Amino acid sequence: MGDELTYDDALAALAWQVELGADEALLDVSVDRFDLPAPKPVAKPAPAPITAAAPVQRAVPDVDAVAIARQLAEGAGSLETLQAAMEGFEHCDLKRGARNFVFCDGHASARVMVVGEAPGRDEDQQGKPFVGRAGQLLDKMFAAIGLDRQVEGADGLYITNMLPWRPPQNRDPKPEEMAMLTPFVRRHIELAEPEIVVLMGNHACAGLLGRRGITRMRGHWEDVLGRPAMPMFHPAYLLRNPAAKRDAWADLLAIKARL
Ligand code: URA
């Protein structure tokens, strides 16, 4: 008998891996989908001979992705239409590299809405914001002041991000990505109508306040679309800098007091 795996052996090996909890197949080397070769150009048919009646060719202007995003966001009259408009938005390259579109988690009836940065690997896989290690810490932080994303209404927590698609290798969002996606986040806040917005980290502050410097800004109430907004250290930062949890606790207490 040769070394080759028989069909039955391969099936048994696969069943064993499924039994162990494997739920997707990965290659030995990860695929950078941003680095894949461009598709081969399709041969164009020969141009038609020019006749006297041939239409004049005009240069196609570059699209203004920010203006398109604003128009789509302003036209959305409900969270469902906003979600659909955002998911169908084709002008952000991040969409091509992401597995899932991540819009929100929790219930929009919550009094507090958290705005984070962008999905990471776990969020990209599950299609929900803040489900990895930082998300687990976020849940514990808000549970400490009686808020829970699983709950509807006053004790709930509604969660979104500045970007709905994971940036490759979790790099920082680019200014042009922030510019074209922020109109959707602003509309998201208007439609969800939270009493308090929590800005998790520098990118949420940059997008919604136009400023960064979370160490100075945290703990001071700001205004986002006419609502009180609290900048806080991002839970991923707190995982790396546990000493900052004391400041985060003070900010959570300020939120609880305001509620
Ligand atoms: N960090 C974020 O800002 N958002 C997520 O959804 C996950 C991690």
Image: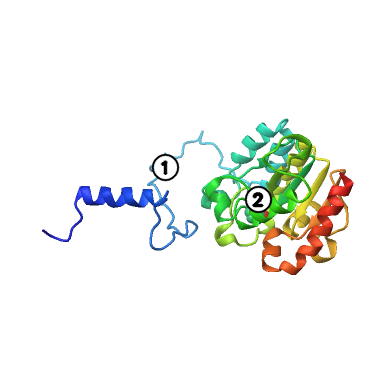
SS under mark 2: loop
> In the picture provided, is 110 more to the left or to the right than 219?
left
Real-space Cα distance between discs 1 and 2?
Answer: 42 Å
Check disc 1 and report the residue beneath it.
Answer: 47
Name the residue located 47 percent from the left edge and 36 percent from the top edge: 51
CB at disc 2 and ligand 1 closer than 8 Å: no
SS under mark 1: loop
The relative height of residue 171 versus residue 209 in the rendered view (above or below) is below
Where's residue 128, x and y in %?
A: 60, 45
Name the residue located 80 percent from the left edge and 58 percent from the top edge: 249
Where's residue 94, x and y in %?
A: 57, 52
Q: Residue 86: tell me if it is visible.
A: yes
The quarter holding residue 233 reads bottom right
- Position of the N terminus, as image quadrant, is bottom left
Residue in front for this viewpoint, 88 or 248: 248
Q: Identify the disc placed on residue 163.
A: 2
Residue in front for this viewpoint, 46 or 75: 75
Q: Residues within 10 Å of mark 2 (few under 14, many from 20)?
A: many
Indicate the amino acid at tag 2.
Leu
Indicate the amino acid at tag 1.
Pro
Where's residue 36, x and y in %?
A: 44, 58
Name the residue located 50 percent from the left edge and 57 percent from the top edge: 34
Where's residue 124, x and y in %?
A: 55, 50
Name the residue located 37 percent from the left edge and 48 percent from the top edge: 18
**Ligand 1: quadrant of the figure:** bottom right
The relative height of residue 83 versus residue 4 in the rendered view (above or below) is above
